[in-house]
Amino acid sequence: MSKIERQPFVAGNWKMNGSLSLVADFNKKLAEVKCDAQVVVCAPSVLLHGFEKVGFSIGAQNVSHLDNGAHTGELSVEMLKEAGCDYVIVGHSERREDQGESNALVAQKAQKSIVAGLTPIICVGESLDVREAGNVESFVAEQLNALTSLMTVDELKRSVIAYEPIWAIGTGKTASPEQAQEVHEFIRGYFSKVDAELAQGLRILYGGSVKPDNAATLFSQQDVDGGLIGGASLKAEDFISICQAAN
């Protein structure tokens, strides 16, 4: 499967932002948009009920690896499905750092999501220290190793990978198109050693200060299949421009 055959994918990660008025604005504006990309909005869980999902899908920003029980503040896969989610972000660098989520836990969450019928958007990426030390590939490979050691090829085929260089998230810094392509190519090459069909069909998103004015150049790279969008996903016009850049 070539890049032409992989449907572009753009997901907005609102993080701890948003309101029901913003949800209403997105409902109206996204319903009027036509684009080739698969579009997903990942909003705080308390806002998910307000989305009409006309022309786009919704996702959560985290999920528990457990089914239920005495786990205050956690959300299960079944709760997310009941809320209308088709997708869920797992392993975002902010949760890996703030909540101490390990590579193994991220893999468990991804597998739990798939078994329940949700598509995980699995985040990987390096810090500036790792990049400057020249260890990007080995660092990302460790994150991917946790996935391939737990998940089957079929489960991996039902996943989306998002490469987010931590140093470019919310900093205004963006990996150059060449830097993004280099790591995306490495990730696809990694999965090609697991299964060639998996690697060709896997959608790999770029995340890290994607904006309307740089999206088209980033998305034109051979192994970049779309984006996981942070700050720019909070303004409907900007998010729509980015989605259309993925056409």
Image (cartoon, grey):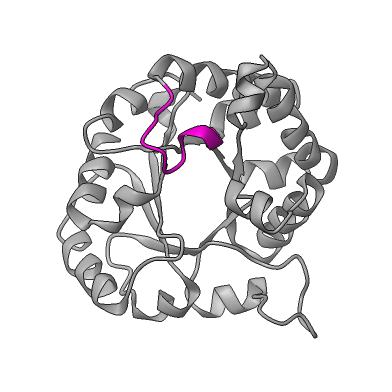
Q: Looking at the picture, tell me which residue is in the foreground, 38 or 227.
A: 227
Q: On the rendered structure, is 96 left or right of 44?
A: right
Q: On the rendered structure, is 218 left or right of 241?
A: right
Residue at screen point 26% across, 41% down: 242
Residue at screen point 58% across, 51% down: 94
The quadrant in which the C terminus is found is top left
Q: Main secondary structure of the magenta part?
A: loop
Residue at screen point 70% across, 19% down: 135
Q: Quadrant location of residue 133? A: top right
Q: Looking at the picture, tell me which residue is in the foreground, 212 or 202.
A: 212
Is residue 196 in view from this perspective? no
Is residue 78 in view from this perspective? yes
Q: x, y (%) of residue 66? A: 78, 71
Q: On the rendered structure, is 194 left or right of 243?
A: right
Q: Quadrant location of residue 36? A: top left
Residue at screen point 55% across, 37% down: 166
Q: x, y (%) of residue 245? A: 25, 35
Q: x, y (%) of residue 160? A: 56, 43
The relative height of residue 196 versus residue 144 in the rendered view (above or below) is: above
**Residue stretch in magenta:** 165-175
Residue 83 magenta-drawn?
no
The outermost residue toward the bottom is 70
Residue 167 magenta-drawn?
yes
Q: x, y (%) of residue 4? A: 38, 26
